[in-house]
Amino acid sequence: MSMQTSRRDFLKTSTIAGVGFMVGAGNSVKIARASALQGLAIAGIGVGGKGASDITQAGFYGKVVAICDVDRKTLESKAKEFPGCKTYTNYKDLYAEMMDKIDAVTVSTPDHMHTIITAEALKNGKHAYTQKPLTRTIGEARYLGYLAKKYGVCTQMGNQGSTLDAMRRCVAQIKAGVIGEIKAVHIWTNRPIWAQGPNRAETMEKFIAKTKAEEEDEEVANELIDEKKKQVEAAFKNLDWDAWIGVAPKREFWPGIYHSFQWRGWWDFGSGSLGDMACHTANMPYGACDLKFPTEVVAESSGHDFDSFPASSKIWFQFPATENRGAIEVTWFDAKTKPEASLFEEYGIKNPTDSGAIIIGDKGVAYSPDDYAQRYQLLAKGGDPLKEIDGVEWRKAPEDEHSGDFDARNKLEWVTAISENKPELCWSNFPNFAGPLTETILLGNLAVWAAPKAGERGETIKWDAKKLQVTNLAELKTPGVAELVRPEYQNGYEKIDWSFIDET
């Protein structure tokens, strides 16, 4: 018997008291509880930033046996939390030594490395918890969903609001018709809170030229250049830059603009404001309004250079009619912009927040004033509350002593699914929810890419979701659109065989 088979047998027979999901009506919902899966061996890849809490919380439900981070200081610090765990700066080394000794992974790296790292785990029958957005590009999201389904593993994306009772109840109420027929959706965020905008790339050659041009005293200029070289070298020595670059095109390291947090604003590494927050803020509207398979999207931006994302953007998505609603438009706002004040006034909403969502129906609206739908209001015109529909069923996520933190609760739902061997128990599993949600969201970035001129609406992207194709690609003047659908990995990494799309 292989080690992988024996570990699976162990996990399937491990006891979790009260595991499972109860479906209830209104507030009469039984609570599912779970205890730790002490036999679950977990590896954490990317353990700084959000990855720090991801692997800590995963450790509530299993044993952390290996961690990986390209930043040696981060790795050393986090290793103290898990005595005896193996440490690596390159995920390839971790997999080579530990693949047959682990059952599950958390992946909390920059967006561009999510797919390559997660895919290898899935192919080896490992369960995966991968941060949002699930991937950097649209095709990668479909790919991870395909692999998760093919290998029958339990997956969850890190949009932790998915396990909130309020979010799930709001989705159920809207689907039941509490606000009537859906007419439009607006979603907005305060992001970016990191640098974005054109002409931000730095190199030593560029720094030297700028310093010599600005400093007349040659000796002073040389001192500034030498000091900068020392600063770069000091930051560089703690970082496995080749592992950080991974599948992206090579570029020169420069402290403070890529690692650790600023990568979100670069097209090669992140997915901008939309990728960072829409998996949270659009989570409730997506579930409530069935926001799959958009057919067109167009954007307006503050301008970008095809290297760094724009400082701000507005995106319009067109969705065709479904069995449950008519055709609708969904509008995305970032950089603290939001719908017209008159919309909020019409429904008695005062002081709308800088991040939130509003779904407009013919009977009223559902308004969430935060990124996770922790709170929501159902309002008629004038501001009178709408009465929730009695008897509407919704599925409650499991709870335990850690789940007062809904981020930990998201991990609990994941390990519950692992214990029950039921991948579908995860709300944000890759094939059914996280993958399609990410596809919808990232389509907006195609439109932003095609809107590089400041203040001008860009080219309209026409989309065939089933085939993952831009149907008007030949007509577009914007270069590089196809690469944001099906990326080509660099630096010798295994490339995706896109023929799987015919099977999905």
Image: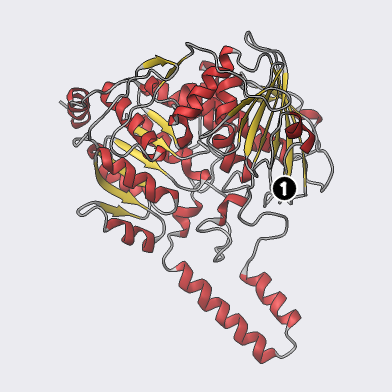
Residue drawn at (45%, 31%) of the image: 164
Q: Nearer the viewer, residue 150 or 353?
A: 353
Q: Residue at x 44, y 49 (%)?
A: 50
Say which of 409 and 7 sits in front. Answer: 409
Which of 287/78 is in front?
Answer: 287
Q: Position of residue 174 (x, y in %)?
A: 58, 18
Residue found at the very far right of the displayed protein: 456
Using residue 289 as the reference point, say whether residue 433 is left or right of it: left
- Pinpoint residue 359: horizontal percent, then vertical percent: 66, 26
Image quadrant occupied by the N terminus: top left
Estimate how packed mark 1 is, as few (under 14), some (14 to 19) or many (20 or more) residues with alpha carbons within 10 Å: many
Residue 241 visible? The answer is yes
Seen as rendered, the residue at the extreme top is 323
> 196 above or below 130?
below
Residue 384's spot in the image, x, y percent? 67, 24
Asked which secondary structure carries label 1, the reply is loop
| Residue that badge 1 annotates | 312
